[in-house]
Structures are given as structure tokens and as C-alpha cells.
Image (cartoon, rainbow, N blue to C red):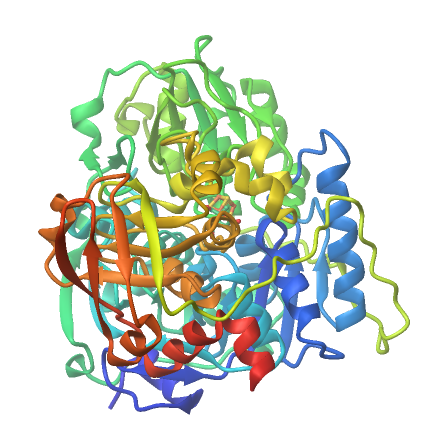
Amino acid sequence: MASVTEKILKAHLKDGRYEAGKEIGIKIDDTLTQDATGTMAYLEFEAMGLPKVDTELSVSYVDHNMLQTDFKNADDHDYLRSVAAKYGVLYSRAGNGICHQVHLERFARPGKTLLGSDSHTPTAGGAGSLAIGAGGLDVAIAMGGGIFYLDTPKVVGVRLTGRLRAWVSAKDIILEMLRRFDVKGGVGKVYEYFGDGVKTLSVPERATITNMGAELGATTSIFPSDDVTKDYLKMQEREKDWVEMHHDSDSDFSEIIELDLAKIEPLVAKPHSPGNVASLKELEGMKVDQVIVGSCTNSSFRDLMVVATILKGKKINPNVSFCVLPGSRQVYSMIARNGALADLISAGARILESACGPCIGMGQAPRSGGVTVRTFNRNFEGRCGTKDAKAYLCSPEVAVAAALYGQFTNPEKLGGYPIIPHDKPMIDDSMIVKPPKDGSKIEIIRGPNIKPLPQMKPLDDEIRKEVLIKVQDNVTTDHIMPAGAQILPLRSNIPAISEFVFSQIDPSFPKRAKEKGGGFIIGGENYGQGSSREHAAIAPLYLGVKAVIVKSWARIHKGNLVNFGIVPLTFEDPKDYDRIAQGDMLEIKDLRDAIKKGIITIRDSTKGFDFNAKVDVSGRAMDVLLDGGEINHVKRK
Ligand code: MIC
Ligand code: SF4
């Protein structure tokens, strides 16, 4: 008797005992990378000195760094193309679409494990894959056939009953989950959806839910693999990838959440957190400046057809800038062939290429203080590129109503709910380049933007350094290592990108860190939530950060710190957080011994008191820390 999650994890178990909270090692069948994290992941793979990837399937996508304002992003694309050919990785070219949407269409397989260097990898859970986001180094190790370690999650069952009302869609289901559980409610958990309501949702709708499950802090989210999954795979000409997967009994879940789909109403996440969810009713009448439909959460054929069908014969409000980004080339070609694209264009939509684009601040930044309404999954302050803009997250239905009326409006006002055709997908994988059988002769192309990885040293036994910065609860990796059109092109150049660490919160951080020869970061609850970018660990490491002491952690970021030899510490008594200030001198002695014991006494010599912090990591991670990071650890072994 087991949940789908447990069945997949146990079938892939390579190390440890399956028991909630305990660390296990699993075999990874498939991997995905995207360009913004991928350059680093492949540099790390190269450093391991292996001749080829050792997975069933590895795909490298280009979808984030698409604005080519100078040589940098194009250099990165060339590097990724050549490295994929050399090591046996499929290469999805720029223009083929957003990694998660393309992966769902062309590769996601029920019952398999997928590890991706992007936090929204759980999108594939919509097709019954156990899909997890991780740092690039974890993915590099998995590409080499290595084990992926995680804490055995609690499996929470989410029982869906009933059917969504007209004008309410999958996005509202995940926003309802976020309304209830907020951005750290899912830490240490997998949300497994089940119940009668599941069959009312198509695979892309399920994927909207598992995608944005990342915002709950969950390890992943998953749907069963049923006849709907089978039909979807059949449409994608991949019926052979289908296996049926269901949980056996309700007692397989550690807890059950009840969601009556008929009771869900249109919801909106307000600035500046995906967990800040309100009913659309509260916002009706509020003026909006920009509306964007796209991102890996809501850019499927279904989503775009809803928007295009509503807009047919209508015009966008003259005060609104309205943009659409199809999630994949497949979706793009389908709406082009069936005429929906023409309907969007004549309504006044600005059509952008199939990519992440504005979701990661690559263009379309709203005006100063503007209100931007997006079908995306994250609305952290400044992420859209305009620091004082206010970003709201909602369904395509709510977005299109706002675009037509120029203000938040109940989409019911639009009349009858559109009927969406079930067009057969256009299958054309010609933008996915297959690697040659023997890639050994291939020369890797390294433009001047590709800089080698920084060297890592074994852990010091004594540290006497200042607190370089003290931050609040729920600090995201977008705060630690911002993205956007200016900074993202530096992802393969650590010295250059490190100049932007904490630039949203305190632009003087990099200079101070260098002047002081490194030091400590103090954080609150859920430190490092959001993206999987390991640059939020590597760049602070480059600036000399030795340890980060917080009240609680987000999973992926904590793993990334360990991978790069920065010690993640947790206050034993969270009240000690209040006693420490930026600039305090902290002293640690016998650090190597303390790591093995799991507890450290730290002296604040400025204020003259001692406090304890836990080294809350597994025995394996302790060894990694002692060796000064995973690369040294692997080399030593
Ligand atoms: C994001 O949505 O924040 C990103 C950009 O896709 C990141 C990855 C990155 O920072 O490159 C993510 O979600 O992991
Ligand atoms: Fe791209 Fe946005 Fe999805 Fe991240 S969340 S993968 S930036 S579309």
C-alpha cells in the first residue's frame, strides 16, 4: 500500500531508509537544465571528467537568456550547444520554448524520476513524473549517473472533488493552496493530488498546479497517471511512455487536504509574494497598466486559446500594454495555424518569442510604480525589472478580463465561457538537436563570457568574521542573487555576477564583503526560497561568505550552500536572531569537530554573549562541508 510518490521513490531507492525526514539517495532517470543555470551545471559536469552523461535522457534547454543585447548570451548558447553534443545531451534550441512546457509535451514520463536545475521542474508532475528542482551541481552529478540525496518527504494527499465553475481554472486551484498554506507550508512535503476531481483536469492544467507547487516550498507535487495522461501522451505520439499509477489507499498519506473544486473562486496573488493571495472580488475596479500571459505556469495551448477566443473581434483597453508568450514552439505553431494568433494580434497583443522573457525580468519591465498583471508564478519585489512596480499573479481568464477592461474585472462579465478546440498537437522536434553517437572529437566553444569555476578550499577550523548583512523572513534567491536582463548574462562569469549579490537590498554588500575578507549572513525564516539558482551560493562564496545563520531554510538553497562549502546553520533559539546586528564580530572555534557533533557554539564578541546553532544536515552533507564542497568531496573520494 503506497502513494504514487512512495512507489516511485522506493523503485529508485539507492541509499538510506524510506522514513519521513530521513535522508535517502535515489537514482535519477532523466535530467533537464536551462541556460541560466545550465552553463554552470555543464562546467561542473566537465570538472568531473566523465566521457558522457549516464542517464536515460538528459535535455539542455535555452529559454531564459534570450535577449541578445551583446555577445554574452549568444556565447552561452554556443557553449551549451557544443557541450551537449560532446556529452550526449539533447539540445533544445532558443525558440523551441520554455523548458518545462516543452519537457511536458515531449519528454515527461509517468513513474520516472526527473531532476532539473530549475525550481519549476515539478511541472512534469502533471504527467505523473516525480520531478524535483535542484542546484546545477546536483543535476551535474545525476547526469554523471550519481545519486541524488533528499530528505524523505511527508506525502500529503490533496483530494479534489467536484468540478471547477466556468471562469475558474487550474491557476485558482494552486492559488487556493497558496492562500491556505503560504510560501513555506510545503517544506519537506510532496503534494499528491487524487480524488474524483482529478479526471476533470487535463495534463497541462495539472501541470499548472504542480508547477506553482514550487511556491509552497514543497519538494514536489504530483498527479496520478490515468486515462487523461494516456490520452495526452497519445496526442503527443508518446503513448509508449504511459504507465498507469495511482495511490492504493487514503492511509498512504500523512495528511489529507480536501479541495471542493466547485467552491474555488477566482484568486489573485498580490505583491510581493505568491502566498499573498486575495479573492479577485477585493481587487475589482483597480486600474492595471500591463497584462502578460505566458510563463511555464500558464502558456499551454489551452491557456492561449482561452485568451484568444475571448479576444476574437475585441480590442485591448487603450491604457493597457498586453503581451503574450506561447510556452513552446508547438503551442506557437498551433495557434498560428488555427488562426488564434491572428485574433490575438488584431486585438492588440504584443506577441513575444516563446521563452521565459518578462517572468525573469528579460524585457517588458512595467512603468514606474505600475500595476502589472501576470499569469506567472512569482511576483517578488523587483523581479519584473521595475523596483517599485506591483506585480499580481492570476489565471489567464482573470488576466484577459483585466486587459479588456483596463482594471481587475470579474471574467464572468465576458459572457459565456469559451469552448476550446482539441486540436491535435503539431509534432516537430526539429529544434531539438540530437547528439552524435560519438562526441569525443567535438570541440567545446568557450567565448569570453565563460569563466572557469572558482576554486574551493577545505573548511577552516576557526572563523572570526563580521556579520556582513542581516535580513528578514522569506528572503528569496531573487534578493540574494537577482536576475533580470542586466545580470542574467553573467551567469557563467562568477567574478562579474558576484558584484550584484544582495543588490536589491543593500548594493554596498559586495564591496563590504570584500573589504572585510568575507563573513556571515544572518537570515530569518524560509531563507533562500524561490529559484534553484546555485549562483545564490557560489557568488557569496566568491565574496568570502563562510556561514549563513537563519531561523529556517528553503530546501534547494540550503542544498546549494552545502554543495559549495558554505555552512548552513540554524539558530537553536530563534530569539538569538534579535540579539545580533550587522557588523557584530562572530567567533567560531573547532568548527570541524562541531560540524560532526551537529551543534556549534558561536561567540558574539561585539555584544559579549554565546549562542548555539545547529548544523542541520545529514552525515553525508557533513563530509561534503568538511571537504569544502561537493566537487572537492567527489575528487577526494
Ligand atoms: C526562476 O523562475 O526564478 C528561474 C529563473 O527559472 C530559476 C532558475 C534560475 O535562477 O536560473 C528557478 O526557478 O530555479
Ligand atoms: Fe522561466 Fe519564469 Fe518558469 Fe522560471 S518561472 S522557468 S523564469 S517561465
The N terminus sits in image quarter: bottom left
* Residue 77 visible (yes or no): yes
Residue lying at the far top in this picture: please name it. 318
Residue visible at 30% across and 64% down in the picture: 198
Residue lying at the far right in this picture: please name it. 441
Residue visible at 61% across and 45% down in the picture: 495
Of residue 612 and residue 605, the one placed in the foreground of this image is: 605
Residue 182 drawn at (x, y percent): 20, 49
Picture mark count: 0
Tell whether 563 sits left or right of 606. Answer: right
Tell whether 437 sits left or right of 471. Answer: right
Tell whether 51 sits left or right of 198. Answer: right
Of residue 231 and residue 31, the one placed in the foreground of this image is: 31
Residue visible at 42% across and 41% down in the picture: 478
Residue 633 drawn at (x, y percent): 52, 78
In the depicted structure, whether residue 369 falls above or below residue 526: above
Q: Quadrant of residue 374?
A: top left
The C terminus sits in image quarter: bottom right
Q: In which quarter of the image is residue 599?
A: bottom left
Residue 141 drawn at (x, y percent): 57, 75
Of residue 267 and residue 476, the one placed in the foreground of this image is: 476
Residue visible at 35% across and 85% down in the picture: 7
Residue 627 drawn at (x, y percent): 48, 75
Of residue 269 and residue 483, the one placed in the foreground of this image is: 483
